[in-house]
Image (cartoon, rainbow, N blue to C red):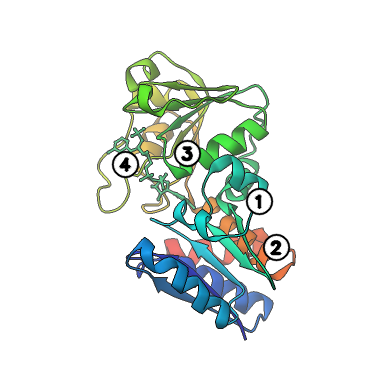
């Protein structure tokens, strides 16, 4: 039996076991996916040692350990080097390698939305780990990126084709795609949006990385202005699928897995 899991803190709510168990079922993998709730950073080294002894093959990493985990691995994939955070590690014979499959999940989401991003202006709300994965994916696709922060002076990034602005400056800005990479609007606080309808009307596409609720107020505002919208479910599924591909060295059919899960979660 192959062993996989999720490392994080207070994660009993996670959707990941459902997602990975669906993949095991669809592909007849003899495997298990367990939740590992670890209280503090000080316990991670010992935890990873026990995982190795238990012959675990891979772990997903979530809040609050996506950056901390880098101290305990032997090798960083190229996207992890640029983003500075990992959400997936693979155990091999003599090493642990870190990956950022959120990055691949975002690229899949842009594909699903039918976006052509070269030289297009994209706005990202927020400056956390998810925003950093967005920046890397968008820069790699040759977009021109603006991040919006409540503290633009503090969070400014020194990257080519990536600028930081305030929410006031955003009021005067238009572009191709706007992405909500803040937690604002997540269940149960669904009656708030990081920006108003006036801002959303200046963009062709709106993507919210939140997947619960299915349509956030941010997406409802964009929808009301006839913009094309997408939520974070495609990203969630495809980061999980990419993790399985890395761990098992196989190629999986993302669309098949997405179709199976989307009805189940939003029924
Ligand atoms: P995070 O680090 O907690 O926050 C992201 C950024 O949002 C912060 O750096 C902050 O930027 C801004 N922010 C936080 N609270 C805010 C508020 N009350 N008002 C306005 N801005 C606020 O979160 P994260 O890990 O990057 O995740 C961001 C979102 O993406 C979450 O909703 C998460 O669930 C979602 N996500 C989804 C997937 C998926 O697979 N669909 C994967 C990863 C993350 P400033 O301080 O610069 O304003």
Secondary structure state at the residue bearing disc 3: helix
103 left or right of 213 in image: right
Residue 212, given in percent of the width and then of the height, sits at 38, 54
Q: Residue at x 42, y 40 (%)?
A: 128
Task: State the residue position of label 2.
Answer: 253
Relative depth, front residue between 213 and 64: 64
Do the residues under discs 1 and 2 have CB atoms within 8 angstroms?
no
Mark 1 lies on a secondary structure that is loop
Q: CA distance from mark 4 to mark 2?
A: 32 Å
Q: Residues within 10 Å of mark 2 (few under 14, many from 20)?
A: few
Horizontal placement of 19 versus 91: left or right? left
Q: Mark on residue 131?
A: 3
Secondary element under disc 2, as helix, strand or loop, is: loop
- How far apart, in angstroms, are the residues tagged by discs 3 and 4? 13 Å
Dot 1: within a 10 Å radius of its alpha carbon, few (fewer than 14), some, or many (20 or more) residues?
A: few
How far apart marks 1 and 3 lie (CA) works out to 18 Å
Q: Residue at (35%, 70%) from the top-left corner?
A: 12
Q: Which residue is mark 1?
A: 77
Q: Is mark 3 within 8 Å of ligand 1?
A: yes
Q: Secondary structure at mark 4?
A: loop
Q: Which residue is located at x 66 percent, y 80 percent?
A: 29
Classify 220 as above or below 33. Answer: above
Tag 4 or tag 3, which sits nearer the N-term?
Answer: 3
Which label number is shown at residue 184? 4
For marks 1 and 2, give the CA distance.
Answer: 23 Å
For the residue with label 4, is its CB less than 8 Å from the closest atom of ligand 1? yes
Residue at 33% across, 40% down: 217
């Amino acid at each position: 039996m192959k062993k996989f899991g999720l490392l994080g803190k207070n994660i009993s709510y996670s959707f990941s076991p459902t997602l990975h168990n669906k993949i095991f079922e669809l592909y007849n993998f003899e495997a298990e996916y367990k939740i590992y709730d670890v209280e503090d950073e000080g316990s991670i080294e010992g935890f990873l040692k026990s995982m190795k002894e238990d012959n675990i093959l891979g772990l997903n990493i979530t809040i609050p350990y996506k950056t901390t985990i880098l101290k305990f691995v032997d090798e960083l994939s190229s996207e992890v080097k640029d983003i500075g955070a990992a959400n997936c590690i693979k155990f091999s014979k003599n090493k642990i390698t870190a990956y950022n499959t959120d990055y691949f999940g975002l690229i899949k989401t842009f594909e699903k939305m039918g976006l052509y991003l070269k030289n297009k202006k994209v706005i990202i709300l927020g400056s956390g780990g998810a925003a950093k994965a967005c920046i890397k994916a968008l820069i790699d696709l040759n977009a021109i990126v603006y991040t919006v922060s409540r503290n633009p002076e503090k969070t400014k990034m020194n990257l080519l084709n990536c600028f930081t602005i305030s929410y006031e400056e955003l009021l005067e800005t238009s572009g191709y795609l706007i992405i909500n990479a803040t937690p604002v609007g997540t269940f149960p606080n669904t009656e708030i949006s990081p920006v108003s309808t006036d801002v959303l009307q200046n963009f062709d596409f709106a993507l919210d990385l939140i997947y619960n609720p299915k349509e956030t107020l941010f997406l409802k505002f964009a929808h009301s202005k006839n913009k094309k919208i997408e939520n974070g479910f495609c990203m969630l599924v495809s980061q999980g699928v990419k993790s399985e591909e890395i761990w098992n060295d196989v190629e999986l059919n993302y669309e098949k897995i997405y179709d199976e899960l989307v009805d189940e979660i939003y029924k």
